[in-house]
Amino acid sequence: MPFDTRELFARLIQCESGGEGDAGMRAVATVVMNRANINYGEFARINQGGNVRNVIEHARQFVCMQTYVEGQYNPQNVFNMQPEAIHFEIVDWAMAGGILPGVDNSLFFYNPYSNECAPFFPTNVGVIHNRVGKHCFYIPTSYYAET
């Protein structure tokens, strides 16, 4: 049985940032909602007027949505998650308009596995905005508008 959007979002939050504490999970939830609410560029075409599920299921955006990565089984995927109350609380907060300060307009994030964030998100569609825990967050550049 497929998950409803709320549960899928909670599983994504747990999988992508469950080890990053409250701020890390809220930061990732903020990015998902920013993508769902933006009205230009690639994510505007994907979100089709605010569809969160379209954003979550968009191909190759979240490693946790992939059961296989580079031909290898990915055990850390949404289907193996068991979200708890905190994950649902963060989803409800985000879907009600919650935005984590310092992440605000970010559309991209990744874990660089180093102490430093790259100045630009790959292909220059994002510029570094902030770091929360192990994840670097990027706001869109003018290049993003052309996507």
Image (spheres, helix red, strand yellow):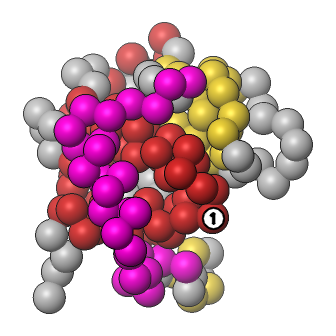
Span colored in magenta: 76-102
Q: Position of residue 128 (x, y in %)?
A: 67, 24
Q: Is residue 84 magenta?
A: yes
Q: Residue, x 30% and y 42% (percent of image)?
A: 94
Name of the residue lying farthest toward the right: 115
Disc 1 marks a residue whose amino acid type is: Gly
Q: Quadrant of the C terminus?
A: top left
Q: Is residue 143 magenta?
A: no
**Left or right: where 59 falls relative to 143:** left
Q: Quadrant of the N terminus?
A: bottom left
Rendered position, 3 above or below 103: below
Q: Position of residue 26 (x, y in %)?
A: 46, 45
Residue 59 makes an appearance in the image = yes
**Which secondary structure lies at badge 1?**
helix
Quarter residue 79 falls in = bottom left
Name the residue tied to disc 1. 19
